[in-house]
Structure formats: structure tokens, C-alpha cells
Image (cartoon, rainbow, N blue to C red):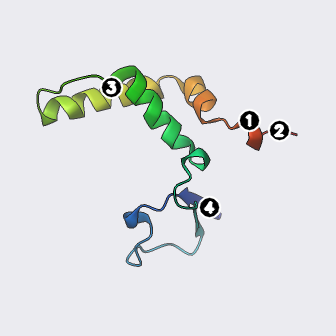
Amino acid sequence: AHGVVILDQAGWHTSNKLAIPDNITLLPLPPRSPELNPVENLWQYMRENWLSNRVFKDYDQIVDLCCRAWNTLIDQPWKIMSIGMRDWAHRS
């Protein structure tokens, strides 16, 4: 099987030190194009609903609340699909 992995331009995604198997093709998105990366909308949704307008007590609380937000979101697969859907990409 062959897989295509879509990735943004983060430095760790574009490193020449990354060992890429022969059956994987990396497809980098253009720089500064969050509209092409559906996960950006997931991060925004999590910030808007669970993580914004807070003062965190310490690092452990940040990690705990982020994990709680992520686990709450992954329990809602239809919400993830609706957030990640791009109407322009699914038109006939």
C-alpha cells in the first residue's frame, strides 16, 4: 500500500533528517495556507470552546485541560467531520 501524508511547512516536517519510507509520499501544503489544513479549524474550535479566556495555574493544568479538550472532541466524530469539511472541495 502507498500513503500520502499532507503536512504543513513546520520545520520538523521539512527536515532532511526525516527518514521517509518508500511507500509514503509527503505532500507539503503551501506556506501560510491554514484554509487547506482542516486540523487548524479543530485547534480553533478547541480554543474557542474549552481553552480560551483562562488563566492557567501551572504547566500540569495546561496539559490536563488540553488533554480533556482533545478527548472531548474525539468523542464527537461527527463534529470533527463537520469542522474539517470544506464545501469547495466536495462540490460536484
In contact (CB < 8 Å): disc 1 and disc 4 = no
Question: What whole-number distance in Å separates the C-alpha atoms at marks 1 and 3?
Answer: 27 Å
Location of residue 83 in the rendering, given as x and y in whole percent from the top left corner: 58, 30
Mark 4 is on which residue type?
Answer: Gly
Question: What whole-number distance in Å separates the C-alpha atoms at marks 1 and 2?
Answer: 6 Å
Where disc 4 sits, the SS reads: strand
Q: Which mark is residue 87?
A: 1
* Crowd band around label 2 with a 10 angstrom C-alpha radius: few (<14), some (14–19), many (20+): few
Mark 1 is on which residue type?
Answer: Asp
Compared to residue 4, the image places residue 48 above or below, namely: above
- Residue furthest to the bottom in view is 16
Q: Marks 1 and 4: which is nearer the front?
A: 1
Where disc 3 sits, the SS reads: loop
In contact (CB < 8 Å): disc 1 and disc 2 = yes
Q: Marks 3 and 4: which is nearer the front?
A: 3
Question: What whole-number distance in Å separates the C-alpha atoms at marks 3 and 4?
Answer: 35 Å
Foreground of the two, 22 or 50: 50
Foreground of the two, 79 or 43: 43
Mark 2 is on which residue type?
Answer: Arg
Compared to residue 54, the image places residue 27 above or below, namely: below
The disc, 3 or 4, on the residue closer to the chain's N-terminal end is 4
Where disc 1 sits, the SS reads: helix
Tag 3 residue = 52
Foreground of the two, 38 or 22: 38
Q: Is residue 1 left or right of residue 38?
A: right
- Residue furthest to the right in view is 92
On the rendered image, what quadrant is the N terminus found in?
A: bottom right
In contact (CB < 8 Å): disc 3 and disc 2 = no
In contact (CB < 8 Å): disc 1 and disc 3 = no
Tag 4 residue = 3
